[in-house]
Image (tube, rainbow, N blue to C red):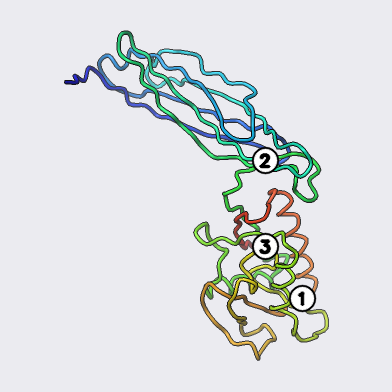
Amino acid sequence: MTTVTGQANMIVINYSYGNTGQGTFAHQIDVSAYNGWGDALNASISGQATMSGDCTRESASFPAKPLKPLNSWRLGESFFNTTATAAGAEGTCATYWYLTFTNGTYPNAVEKYEINEFRCDNNTGGRPTVGCVVWWYASALTYSKAVTPNLVRHVKLAQGSGLPGATFDAPLRRTTNPLVTAANRDRACDDAPSIQDMSCDEYPIATSKNGLSAGGTRRSFDGCSLPDIPSGTGAKGASICMIPALENSSQGGSNTQFFRAERMLGEDPFRVLTSN
C-alpha cells in the first residue's frame, strides 16, 4: 500500500536553440515549484543531459539544489556538437534531460524530457560551413505584395483553390532533383504563350515535390492570360499564370535565398506565405 506524504507542483520549461551557421546547439531546461505540501517540498532536484545520434556532448550542468523556496528557478544547460562535419555530410541528433528528485529515505524519482531533433549538415548549396536546423519545422517562404503583386495574387488564388503550401498541416516539400524540377516546369509551362515582358509562373513552385510531376492537371484563373486552361480545385495538380517576367525572376532569387538560409534539403517541408 502506498501512502502519499506530499506533492510538489512545478512549471517545467524545456527548450532548445541552434544556428544555421554553426555546428553547436543547446538544450536547456528550467524548473520552478510553485506550490505543494508535505514532504515533497523538501526534495532536491538535479539533472543529467545526454543525446543520441550524430553528435557529442560538449558540456552540461544542472547541479543539485532544493526545490524550495517556491517560485524560484532551477536551471539546466547543455551544449552539443554535430559530428556531421565532413563535406557532404548530414546527421541528426536528439537530446534529453533526465531530472532526478531526491528526498531523504524516499526512492529517487526520475523524469525524462526530450525536445526538437536537430539536423546538421555540410551539404547545403551556397553554405560552405556546417549548420544545424530543426528540419521538420515548415519554415515560411514569404512573397511581398509590395514587391511582387502579381505573383502574390497568383499564389493566393492557387492556394485558395486547394493547392497545398499555406499551412503546417499541408506544406510543400522541397526537391533537389533537377529532373523533378524540370518535369514540373515543362508540364506546367512548356506551351505557355509568348507575351512581351511576361513569363509563366507555376504553383506549387517547381522546386517542390508537389508540382505536376506528382500528378494532377493544370488550372488557371481570370486575369492570367491563359483562357484555354480551365479553373479547378483540389490538392493535386498545379496552377499557372502569366505574370511580369521581372516578378518571376525576383521569385527565383527569393526561393534560392530562402532554401540557402534555412538549410533546406530534399524532402524538407516549407510553407509559402504572402505579406503586404
Which residue is at the front of the view, 61 or 105? 105
Which residue is at the front of the view, 3 or 201? 3
Label 3 Cα crowd, 10 Å radius (few <14 / some 14-19 / many 20+) = many
**Badge 3 is on which residue?**
143
Q: CA distance from mark 1 to mark 2?
A: 38 Å
Vertical placement of residue 96 versus 45, above or below: below
Name the quadrant of the N terminus.
Answer: top left
**Badge 1 is on which residue?**
244
Location of residue 100 in the rendering, given as x and y in whole percent from the top left corner? 42, 19
Instruction: Identify the mark nearer the N-term, 1 or 2.
Output: 2
Q: Residue at x 59, y 59 (%)?
A: 271
Name the kind of residue labelled 1 in the image.
Answer: Pro
Q: CA distance from mark 1 to mark 3?
A: 15 Å
Which residue is at the front of the view, 119 or 274? 119
Extreme-top residue of the structure: 104
**Badge 2 is on which residue?**
120
Extreme-right residue of the structure: 196
Name the kind of residue labelled 2 in the image.
Answer: Cys
Label 1 Cα crowd, 10 Å radius (few <14 / some 14-19 / many 20+) = some
Viewed as shown, does residue 160 lie left or right of 84? left
Extreme-bottom residue of the structure: 228
Q: Using the rendered view, name the quadrant where residue 36 is placed.
A: top left
Name the kind of residue labelled 3 in the image.
Answer: Tyr
